[in-house]
Image (cartoon, rainbow, N blue to C red):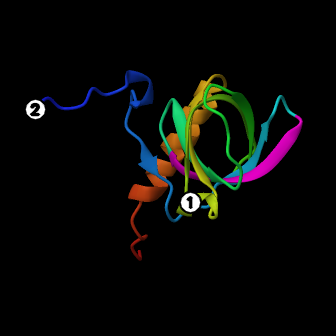
Amino acid sequence: MNAPATVPSLRRADPRSEVSGQEVHGIVSYSQGHEQAPFILWDISDQGLRLWTPVRLKPSDVVRLTVVKPNVLILSADVRWCRAVGGGDEGFYVGLHVLDNQRRLEALHKSMLEAKTAGPMSPT
């Protein structure tokens, strides 16, 4: 029996980091900028994001993200996939490939990795 083929467009090109313990959220603009919804960042890589939002987004749509915490960052991204959480009653996880502001996304990813690996400060 052969293993199912993996769809290359759904695979990540680089490692991702969970955002647990760090609150990163903002606003996603969709429907050509006519609609907005809040989002919470779930995980991050140097080229993409997975977020939670209460609205279903369409794969291949381009959305605009405004990260408001911890720092303001505006990104355009291509929706790669959207999956319901709890049948859609609990929102949606959305996979995004970032189209611009790559260096700022990489800096955010790096700062989150550093925060995740930093241990408690020792007394001096």
Q: Which residue is depicted at the point 56% across and 60% down?
A: 87
Residue 9 image point, x, y percent: 44, 23
Residue 96 image point, x, y percent: 57, 34
Which numbered marker is on residue 48? none
The magenta region covers 34-43
Task: For mark 1, give the secondary structure.
Answer: helix
Residue 86 in the image: above or below residue 15: below
Which numbered marker is on residue 87? 1
Q: Is residue 81 left or right of residue 71?
A: left
Q: Is residue 102 left or right of residue 124?
A: right
Q: Which residue is depicted at the point 39% across and 27% down?
A: 13
Mark before the other along the chain sequence, 2 or 1:
2
Q: Which residue is depicted at the point 71% across and 50% down?
A: 55
Inspect the magenta stretch and tell me whether residue 105 lies in it: no
In three-dimensional space, the C-alpha distance between marks 2 and 1, rounded to whole angstroms, equals 31 Å
Judging depth in this view, the residue of 87 and 45 nearest the camera is 87
Residue marked by disc 2: 1
- Total marks shown come to 2
Kindly indicate the quadrant of the structure image that contains residue 28: top right
- What amino acid type should be assigned to the residue bearing mark 1? Gly
Residue 118 in the image: above or below residue 120: above
Judging depth in this view, the residue of 4 and 30 nearest the camera is 4
In the picture, the quarter occupied by the C terminus is bottom left
